[in-house]
């Protein structure tokens, strides 16, 4: 499965790529292995991982039953913004609907997905999603 081209990791005081504040207080700690406090925060960190090319976080935060055998970065794809449309959690399941803008050269697109998450061993993980 391919994702965007890697960018430099933001400094702790830089804006987080997910739009949630300073990187060091938003997605940075989650990319470093701290458990996400909610499925929405995990989704935001996964978007940020696409932006910065953190395949380790993508693999670690993906349920092993549905995770692809290989993850790779697609040359030239640039992620440009994230909008959360809906998020709700129950005890150990959650749904986050989002739109993520990207471009490849002069082509601009928006990925819309309704993602499902489960809590596994006390940590939220991405299970799967429906792309529209």
Image (cartoon, helix red, strand yellow):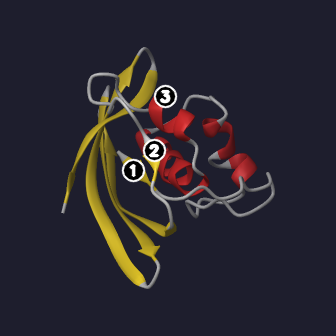
Name which residue lies at 27% across and 22% down: 65
The quarter in which the C terminus is drawn is: bottom left
Placement of 78 over or under 50, stated as above or below = below
Q: In which quarter of the image is residue 68?
A: top left
| 74 w.r.t. 31: above or below | below
Secondary structure type for disc 1: strand
Residue under label 3: 60
Q: Characterize the local packing of mark 2: few (<14), some (14-19) or many (20 or more) Cα atoms within 10 angstroms.
A: few
What is the C-alpha distance between the residues marked 1 and 2? Answer: 5 Å
Q: Which of marks 1 and 3 is nearer the N terminus?
A: 1
Q: Which residue corresponds to the image point at 62% horizontal and 29% vertical from the top-left?
A: 33
Label 1: how many Cα within 10 Å (few below 14, some 14–19, many 20+): few
Q: Which of marks 1 and 2 is nearer the N terminus?
A: 1
Residue 129 visible in the picture: yes
Q: Do the residues labelled 1 and 2 touch (CB within 8 Å)?
A: yes
- Image disc number at residue 2: 1
Residue annotated with mark 2: 72
The quadrant holding residue 15 is bottom right
Tell me if label 3 and label 2 are in contact, CB under 8 Å: no
- Tell me residue 10's x, y (percent): 74, 56
Residue 67 % position (x, y) = 33, 31
Residue 73 percent location from the top left of the image: 48, 51
Which residue is located at x 50 percent, y 70 percent?
Answer: 81
Between the residue at mark 1 and the residue at mark 3, the CA separation in whole angstroms equals: 16 Å
Q: Which residue is drawn at 80% across and 54% down?
A: 11
């Amino acid at each position: 499965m391919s994702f965007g081209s890697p960018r430099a990791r933001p400094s702790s005081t830089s804006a987080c790529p997910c739009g949630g504040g300073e990187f060091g207080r938003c997605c940075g700690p989650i990319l470093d292995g701290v458990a996400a406090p909610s499925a929405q925060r995990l989704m935001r960190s996964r978007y940020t991982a696409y932006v910065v090319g953190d395949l380790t976080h993508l693999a670690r935060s993906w349920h092993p039953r549905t995770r692809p055998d290989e993850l790779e970065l697609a040359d030239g794809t640039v992620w440009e913004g994230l909008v959360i449309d809906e998020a709700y959690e129950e005890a150990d399941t959650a749904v986050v609907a989002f739109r993520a803008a990207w471009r490849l050269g002069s082509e601009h697109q928006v990925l819309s997905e309704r993602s499902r998450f489960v809590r596994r061993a006390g940590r939220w993980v991405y299970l799967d999603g429906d792309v529209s």
